[in-house]
Amino acid sequence: MYKPLGLFALFILLALAIRIEAVQLFDERVIEAAVSLRVPWVSQVMLWITELGTTAVLLPLLLLSCAVLYVYKKTPDVVFLPLMFLIERIINIKVKELIERARPAYEPLVHETSYSFPSGHSMNAAVIYPVIAYLFIKHVPFFAAKKRIVSVCTGILVILIGISRIYLGAHFPTDVLAGFSLGLCLVSLFVLFDEKYHPFRQK
């Protein structure tokens, strides 16, 4: 239970920290540095990577993942996977409306209309990819046999999506860290529930 509490505490700390001038200055300097380092081919790669955190990509991935889980007769998880995504999206939207942090204004390469804190793409990635990896490792022998590789690749993908949001000027670093911490908090709660309290857990 300590892990989700720690991650939630980190999120609260970040939510408070973004009001501090020194933290705001740090965020701005990182964005400025990212803009100064841009080159066309890296920008294109980052645009591709950032798409992996969008609903347009994640919804088909969720459907495919649910189909795989259904084949393995893991019906409860077929329900819980899209439910996790729905809960995550609602929380992200409501928190953004509560915090009301403006987006960076440093030559963004993508244009967003919602508030900035916490990063939606980062939170999407921090929830959906780890949960899919967790369920596939648990239920699908091919992924279970490659648990370490799957876990490392999932972590790298999530981090790259977060980096892409900073590089593209869509989010401050603290937005991304907040998206990661709140998203991973939800994942930790899901795993805790699945391992200890899941009423439909299949042996």
Image (cartoon, rainbow, N blue to C red):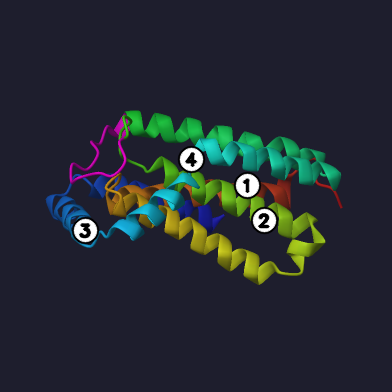
Q: CA distance from mark 1 to mark 4?
A: 21 Å
Within 10 angstroms of label 1, few (less than 14), some, or many (20 or more) residues? some
- The amino acid pointed to by label 1 is Phe
List x then y, in percent, for residue 177. 36, 53
Of residue 60 and residue 133, the one placed in the foreground of this image is 60
Residue pointed to by mark 4:
54
- The amino acid pointed to by label 3 is Val
Of residue 69 and residue 34, the one placed in the foreground of this image is 34
Q: CA distance from mark 4 to mark 2?
A: 20 Å
Residue pointed to by mark 2:
134
* Magenta span includes 107: yes
In terms of image quadrants, where is residue 7? bottom left
Select label 1 or label 4 by which is in front.
4
- From which residue to which does the magenta span run? 98-111
The tally of labels here is 4
> Residue 135 vs residue 86: left or right?
right
Select label 4 or label 2 by which is in front.
4
Of residue 149 and residue 77, the one placed in the foreground of this image is 149
> Residue 6 vs residue 147: left or right?
left
List x then y, in percent, for residue 38. 25, 59
Residue pointed to by mark 3:
30
Label located before the other in sequence (1 or 4): 4
Label located before the other in sequence (1 or 3): 3
> Secondary structure under badge 4?
loop
- At horizontal 63% and vertical 34% (from top left) the residue drawn is 83
Asked whether residue 82 appears in the rendered view, the answer is yes
Residue pointed to by mark 1:
190
> Secondary structure under badge 3?
helix
